[in-house]
Amino acid sequence: MATSAEPINPSTTRLGWIGTGVMGRSMCAHLINAGYTLTVFNRTLSKAQPLVDMGARLAQTPHDLAAQSDIVFSIVGYPSDVRQVLLDPTTGALSGLRPGGILVDMTTSEPSLAVEISAAASSKSCSSIDAPVSGGDRGAKNGTLAIFAGGDEAVVDRLNPVFTLMGKVNYMGPSGKGQSAKLANQITIASTMVGLVEGIVYAHKAGLSVPAFLDAISTGAAGSKSLEFHGSRILKRDFEPGFFVNHFVKDLGICLQECQRMGLALPGLALAQQLYLSLKAHGDGNLGTQALILALERLNNVTLAS
């Protein structure tokens, strides 16, 4: 068991990983490749199989996983899932974690839940860090994610050797501030995506070659990571999820709740949320966020494919 003073390293620190979906699988693989002893849990066991094949142990519950881990990472779908896997009194990770253990939730979730988890962890002489990420499936695969960390700065610093394997950690402040930073990140992406697909639909309707248009704007002021990540995918009509529409709708919903609570009017956010919600209504929730082009095509009765 690594004590709180002991540096984190593969020979002494045991890691647990809850949630082996699109993001979690790649992030967790970096830790296994770095030589860490890993125990994994996923509700759909088959999704954890690639990691088990790499040498990870499979736990039957988050509680069992935490009982054999010093640090437990989680990246699941919804705040309700976070609450279940971390705080459930019998099966949750915190119930199995020894004093001095650390929870690191990388799910995009509610800042208030992060504060609640931190308080629950403290009452058990454990620590909790909220560390949601940005960069999608590509960032997860390449180990280039932006990580937004909230909680005790000394604990975040201590976790740096592990965070570095996944990307770049940015300390944002006390518990909940990692989540607030991620929500602000999602707000920024939401309107950027609307602008990108509107530009594409306009270019198409105006008779431009859309590939030539995207290439031309990529080096100017309209260039963006969204264009870089999604431009070619949109052109190929490749809607495979780097990030699910369903999860983006969830994130934007949390953003709107927070805005309601703060008395903040963000009309661009609200518009983007409505457009993404229309994708969900059309059964496109399991596509990637680049599928926003479909909402604009439907709105205008055009299709880029023609």
Image: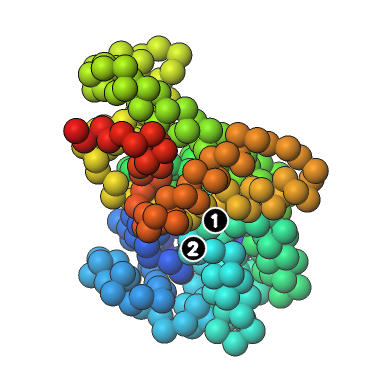
Q: Position of residue 4 (x, y in %)?
A: 63, 62
> Which residue is at the front of the view, 34 or 301?
301
The local crowd at label 2, few if under 14, some if 14 to 19, many if 20 or more residues have their Cα within 10 Å, is: some
User: Is residue 184 shown above or below 2?
Assistant: above
User: Is residue 74 shown above or below 43?
Assistant: above
Task: Name the quadrant of the C terminus.
Answer: top left
The image quarter in which residue 97 lies: bottom right
Name the disc covering residue 250, or none: 1
Left or right of 51 on screen, residue 17 = right
Element class at badge 1: helix
> Which residue is at the front of the view, 15 or 231?
231
Label 2 amino acid? Gly
> Which residue is at the front of the view, 261 or 294?
294
Asked whether residue 111 appears in the rendered view, the answer is yes
Q: Position of residue 212 (x, y in %)?
A: 24, 17
Q: Position of residue 221 (x, y in %)?
A: 45, 14
Label 1 amino acid? Lys
Left or right of 46 on screen, residue 127 = right
User: Is residue 71 shown above or below 230?
Assistant: below
- From the image, tell me which residue sits under label 2: 77
Residue at 46%, 69% (x, y): give it: 18
